[in-house]
Amino acid sequence: MQRIYLNDNWYFTKNYTEDLLNPEADLSELEKVRIPHNVCELPYSNFDEMSLQQLCGYRRSLIVEDAWRSGHLLLTFEGAAHEAVVYVNGHQAVKHYGGYTAFSVDILPFLAEGSEQIITVRLDSRESLNQPPFGSVTESLTYGGIYRDVYLDVKNDYYIEDIYTATPDVRTDEKILKAEIKLNAYTEGLILAAHLDTWTEIPVEDDNLQHWDLKNAEVYFRTSCLTYTVPDAMLWDVEMPNLYILTVELIKDGQCIDSKKVRVGFREAVFDGEGFWLNGRILKLCGFGRYQSWPYTGYAMPKSPQQLDADLLKFELGANAVRTLQGPQSQYFMDRCDEIGLLVIPEIPGWQFVGDTRWKKITVRNVREMIMQYRNHPSVILWDVRVSDSDDVDPLYYKTSRLAKELDVYRQTGGVRDFAGSRFFEDVYLYDDMSQDAGSALVDSENICQDPSKSCILAGHHSLTEDTKAGGIESYIRQMVQQAKVWRAAESNDSLAGSLSPKMTDYPISRRYSGGSGICMRGVMDWFRNPKLAAALFKSQREDEPVCVAAVPVSDQMIVLTNADHILLYCDNKLVDEFYPDEKEFRDLVHPPIIIEHLCDILHTGQNPHSYFAKYHAVTWRIEAVKDDNVIAQTCVSPAPEAKLQIMTDRQTLVEESSYDVATVHIEAVGESGQHFYEYEIPLILKTEGDIELIGPDVIMMQGGFAGTYVRSLGRNGKGRLMIQDGHGEAVVNFSVKV
């Protein structure tokens, strides 16, 4: 009962040959890497996407203790994109098709004499592979590499292979926990013992912590289905995501020979013709689609950035749900969604294209692996079992939907279509609206799925293709306004269970599909997770933090995003007037934008405001956000102030656990009043010292007043510094590293 992470000490080559299987192979010319790893580091944009399509190789040695040679040695790859063949001492141990789900193999039969064993991986990331998501042009760029954790589990002869938990009835005083426990093998005399405890991120002693010793059970078959009554268990909800830890022990001859832990959330999630119900109350879904990619490293990021994305969705953007675009995503991301109460709809890989018989067979396998590996997450409310935006392929989707219900009887299924009137076997119609009219989100769901008993979710909207590629404040405002129109339409449509239509971040896209730089800039955050103006719109719909963000475009107006009741506008410290949210255009939003027209008239100049600012440098707008007669926030918009860099990072202490740790660094150009400079585009010079290293280039460009970078730990305790120069000065960020 031991887990050993194998993320360090790998050798990597971009050109796999059979020589890599030779135990005496010369590795001196190979690159030494740590997992997570991408097959190559790409520039931010204008990259050669063909460099990602490689037949590459990984290799490392493994020291096996004598005590491990009885029982089982389970080698697991959480994610290897996209076709992986694993060899142990030159013998093929397993072949796996698909880069978005985990796979395991017992390597004990392949061990050689002596303690040192050789693990080799032949990894194919070429788009010529006959498997999802390939076969046509993919919507987002696909990356290759061993990009999630690798570990070895040391097991006895008998061990717990899987636990599947469900909470079928939570709206009673005596709540029910069902646990299906599967062993690798059966023998007489095995006993299962279980207990349930309140989950806490940090172990503490607290009177509010709950504990139940659950009834022991004798084992008669490989699979045992147990039912426990858990009185007074607290519910898991988006507002109070109460979690528990179920620990199951396998006992033989009075000794614990294996144990397994799973987190449990007591909750009921149901879709019907009225919408989405969570624990018996209707809840409108409001969320985003998330791509699992980052600049430079692609899919390859460890625990911290994965968790950060969940936090940004929940706390920065105000989402209650997320759709995992491209395929199932990191368990670290999913765990964090469980912890903070963020609902998740995982989807299988692929976009538009459905291939041949072999391709379809792998799609069905993707469904099986996705559900088996993610079904214990209480945050998962729906399985997307259809290739996104594909045509009706009835035999395939009948099979995927039926399989999902067999593997998880307590969750429903859905699938994304880009057309109305699709034949479907699922429970929820996820509609990708291809019209340009934001108001089309008002269309009754019966006209989309033609079944009033089914739920419909707005999964995408073509009008949101407005991106910020053009740069300048005008493009950011256009994007924000369009996002607000679609959201308003979705919020006012009672026949929709909700909207997951916006993209969380910019993302890389095949230039064969889009042309240009290779970056699709439709996200409400840029690729470094810097918030655009549209992000402030979503944040302003929350009540937990005061928001007041103002934008003055080239045109004769000002837009203010706030969660206050109204604003007071001052010009050079003189009160101009008070202004209220636009209840007409955006009436269904909790806090509609405030749009102030005719700034020139307010100044009594008859000039364009920008021209006036540039000429006189004297006008400063101050906005005070007022709620319940109190000023809760304020901001200023000043003419041509001197820009400075504002540096923020999500962490200054890097902690290595299973692998290296990464800090995300946000760089923003702001004035003295805190206003953002959308026109600020200059080069920055980056440099690190000490026990950290830079991810990406040491010279970057600010775009739209934003930039970003990453630093990672190097496997040793110590300290490090990141220096950022913009030609006017230097900013320094200090880090500490714990291993």
Image (cartoon, rainbow, N blue to C red):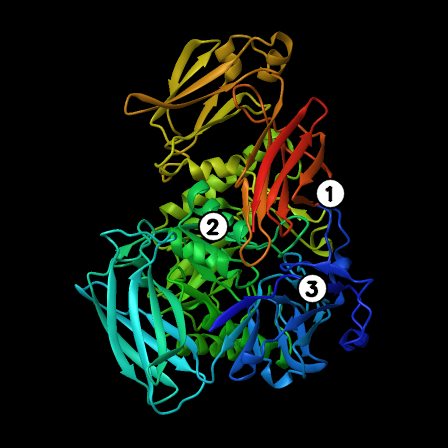
Q: Classify 192 as above or below 597.
A: below
Residue at figure coordinates x 39%, y 38% from the top left: 541
Q: Is residue 68 above or below residue 586?
A: below
Amino acid carrying mark 2 in the image: Ala
* Image height of 374 relative to 467, above or below: below
Q: What residue is shown with label 2? A: 310
C-alpha span from label 2 to label 1: 26 Å
Q: Nearer the viewer, mark 2 or mark 1?
A: 1
Q: CA distance from mark 1 to mark 3?
A: 23 Å
Mark 2 burial class by Cα count in 10 Å: few <14, some 14-19, many 20+: many
- Front of the two marks 1 and 3: 3
Residue 63, x across and y down, in percent? 63, 72
Instruction: Give the class, few, some or many, for how many residues have Cα within 10 Å of label 3's Cα (few <14, many ≥20).
Output: many
Rendered residue at 37%/18% (across/down)? 578
Q: Which residue is mark 1?
A: 697
The amino acid on which the numbered mark 3 sits, given as a three-letter code, is Trp
Query: Could you say which is closer to the camera, residue 206 or residue 84?
Result: 206
Give the quadrant of residue 222. bottom left
Q: Position of residue 145 (x, y in %)?
A: 67, 63
Q: Amino acid at mark 1?
A: Pro
Quick check: 225 left or right of 640?
left
Which residue is the site of mark 3? 10
Helix, strand or loop for disc 1: loop
Return the disc, 2 or 1, that comes first in the chain's sequence. 2
Crowding at dot 1, Cα within 10 Å, few <14 / some 14-19 / many 20+, comes out as some
In depth, the one of 96 and 284 nearer the eye is 96
Q: Quadrant of residue 407?
A: bottom left
Identify the residue at image location x=38%, y=46%.
491
Element assignment for label 2: helix
| Residue 423 at least partly seen | no
